[in-house]
Image (tube, helix red, strand yellow):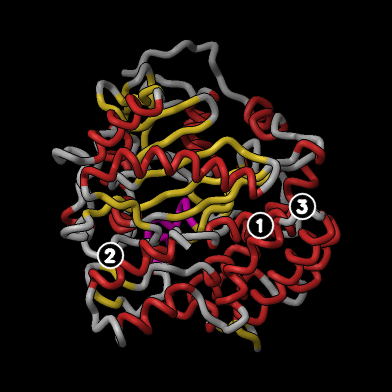
Amino acid sequence: MINVNKEQILSKDEILKLYTKGYKNPIDFKIGMEYERLPISEISFKAVDYWAEYGIKSFLEEFAKEATWDYILDGRNIIGLKNKHDSITLEPGSQIEISAEPQKTVFQMKNKIEEINETIEDVLCASNTVLLNYGVSPYSTHKSINLIPKRRYRIMANYLWGILSDVMMRETAGIQCCIDFESEEDAMRKFKLANKLTPFMTAMFANSPIRGGVDTGYKTFRGLSWINTDNDRCGFCGKISEEFSFEDYIDCVLKTPMIFIQKDNLQFEVNGDITFEEYMKNGFNGAQATLEDYELQANLYFPEVRMRNFIEIRNHDCVGGDLKYAILAIYKGIMYSNQAMDECEELFKHLQYKDFSELRYNVPKQALQARIKKAKAADYAKEIIKIAEKYLKQAQTGEDLFLESIKEYTYKGLCPADIIQKRWNGVWNRDLKKMIKYLISANEQ
């Protein structure tokens, strides 16, 4: 039995405030980034374990000393670090994520990331560990990658029922972009458009073909893993409906099966027996739903685009060099210009939900060569870049510079995975060492 204050009964109006508090004046709009990488051994190419002698726990402790960051703890276990508005956290398989304070320009974000990276590299240099800018573990598979000691991850691993959910949790690394909105109308317009952009962006930045030391035949095995994680909480939210609101988004979260409840720092497994909507109506084992419960439920909901008091666009493989900033530049160029959004909506106006859904399923294998109606994803991707470039140039911030790296691929109908697969089956002769060297050098460009 869970003890709870009976007066803490949750209403939809309380939940709604979580989203409306995100309203910002357009002059205050910023761009956010969550940047995950894979820690691997430069000697064995295996994933570096949390508990190893020079493992991820040791890295966090040393970084905290070097940079004077504070611990983030789960019980007595260190699971991350924070410094004001910046954080370094761990994904389930010890993937290292930087969440930097949102910035006005992509240049400022790049400076922030590079500043943090300098200290990371100094700490890791003696341990033969490298943080790989790649979408899936190139050698170790989930069977040999231990979960970090964060209690909720053990519950999630036991619950998520998709055939590749363990791959998603333990093997993959991605980049997320966060954007602001000024009103519910603005938020919903950006939310719907971001959903439509997502399969094209996933294709453009596909970067995870080699997994377990073999060519999987997929351009983004990471993208495939998300399709096979948990259809109750993944995919498009609301079928990219033309009529959508904060309340509609909340309803999607409410109708999702619950994984667990957390009270007084203890987790109580629910295992999908009830939805959050049922929890609000009837409680569970003596507990009544609270706003904190809803926030946990929303964090355990993994759509392609997630609403918070900002919009989080999620499904991009980790990429290196300036490619990672090209992701931010594209979204900034489009989402912070009403004219750019007009042009993208015009580009997509003849496409239906089923077209985007089919593309989402075809992109992991075919990337930019996947077809959508009578065209290829590459045809749309080129137009998306052109629209973003046009309005970034109009803004005169110089951020259109970051599009050059992705144009080199997209305008040829290629994604990063195409280059890797060609070399893997050609000049590299399936030598993992040569691939790792390429990925490390590509990040330094």
Relative height, residue 199 to residue 159 (above, below) = below
The answer to whether residue 383 is seen in the rendering is yes
Q: In this view, does 106 lie to the left or right of 166?
A: right
Start-end of magenta stretch: 224-234
Q: Residues within 10 Å of mark 1 (few under 14, many from 20)?
A: many
Front one among 174 and 163: 174
Q: Which residue occupies 81% across, 36% down?
A: 25
Residue position marked by numbered label 2 in the rendering: 138
Q: Which residue occupies 65% across, 36% down?
A: 309
Residue position marked by numbered label 1 in the rendering: 329
Label for residue 234? Answer: none
Q: Where is residue 343 in the image (x, y as percent from the top left)?
A: 81, 68
Q: Which amino acid does label 1 sit on?
A: Ala
**Sequence-first disc among 2 and 1:** 2
Q: Which amino acid does label 2 sit on?
A: Pro
Of tags 3 and 1, the one toward the viewer is 3
Q: What residue type is labelled 3?
A: Thr
**Sequence-first disc among 3 and 1:** 1
Q: Position of residue 85 (x, y in %)?
A: 54, 29
Judged from the image, the secondary structure of the residue bearing numbered disc 1 is helix
Instruction: Examine the structure image and report whether residue 197 is included in the region drawn in magenta.
Output: no
The quarter of the picture where residue 76 lies is: top left
The quarter of the picture where residue 155 lies is: top left
Residue position marked by numbered label 3 in the rendering: 397
Relative height, residue 264 to residue 105 (above, below) = above
Q: Which residue occupies 53% across, 53% down?
A: 314
Judged from the image, the secondary structure of the residue bearing numbered disc 2 is loop
